Amino acid sequence: MQTELEGTEEQVDEREALLEDARARIEDAGDADAVKAVERDFVGKKGSVSALMAKIPSLPPEERRDFGQGVNELKRAIQDAAQAKLDALAKARLAQDRSASDFDPTLPPPAQARGSLHPITQVTRELEDLFESMGYEVLDGPEVELDFYNFEALNIPSDHPARDSQDTFFCDDAGHLVMRTHTSPVQIRAMERLEPPFRVVVPGKCFRQETTDATHDHTFHQMEGLVVGKDISVAHLIGAMKTLLEGIFERELDVRMRPGFFPFVEPGFELDARCPFCRDGCSVCKQTTWIELLPCGLVHPNVLRAGGLDPDEWSGFAFGLGLSRLVMLREQIDDIRHMLSGHLRFLEQF
Ligand SMILES: [Zn+2]
């Protein structure tokens, strides 16, 4: 018992001596670098406090706890002393700067660097304005979606081959919950919520388990459009698409429609626009002078039914605009992976 106490006293003395030494050296330090160097000498990896720490395993078990606590307190005390000295140095420095003859308190502060909106945000906002001017409402929908809204209600039953082409991220083992593979689920949600006739657009993120390359990413942006009313025809669809493209490219572009298969529309089309960058072919349009822009069509009766509408009474058209692709086209971006890279070198260009 006696020897143990003595040993502890010795240890306390050792720590107090270390702390005193540290405080004295910190006090003498002339600038921030010197303070940090002293701090390192004591609490750094090879510092004397760490050396004390390393002793713990060799102590009798009943002493280890108190000893460890003591060393931690020492470490904190040294760090506090260093911080207090750093604060004092910074304050002194500021006071000195302020009293210097060339200090002018009326000068404006240095300009803050300002960021800019992401090109996808810019185009989304432009399109939202454009569609709102045509009487559309902007809707939002969940990014984690029920299988029912993402597939079933869109006329893609569980055995439909179209599911295979949408490499889906599943969120549960049963496959009831998915990361939405398109913005189309909001078509059904809109029909459930809104009283027809209505027009909506839905910008948002979509997710597919893709092997990424210059034109594919696991996360991309779409803008869904849905118009429901009486006697909606392909002519309405073409009219809306031409207005849309004029809004985006700020001039009139010829469009053409090719038949395309999408389970949730009937008839379905691929809409192409004249390449806005050339007259006789370029790399963007792969020398064809046409650019594939968006799938669209008249809403399939099954989809109207799934949304609770009577297909004999109501009809509609829908389109799915690839926002990421559109931004790439307009800004001539050559790799979709730049979009979500977060690299300032990319973002600062917009
Ligand atoms: Zn071209």
Image (tube, rainbow, N blue to C red):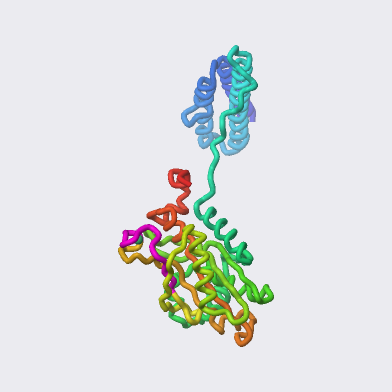
> Is 56 situated left or right of 161 in this image?
right
Residue located 63% across and 66% down the image? 135
Quarter location, residue 229: bottom right
Answer yes or no: is residue 243 visible.
yes
> Is 142 situated left or right of 325 in this image?
right
59 or 51, which is in the foreground? 51
Residue 319, how many percent across, how many down? 51, 71
Q: Main secondary structure of the magenta part?
A: loop
133 or 75, which is in the foreground? 133
**Rendered view: 97 above or below 231:** above
Answer yes or no: is residue 13 visible.
no
Question: Would you say residue 283 sits in the magenta stretch?
Answer: yes
Residue located 64% across and 28% down the image? 5
Displayed-image quarter of ligand 1: bottom left
**Rendered view: 335 above or below 160:** above
Residue 89, how many percent across, how many down? 60, 19
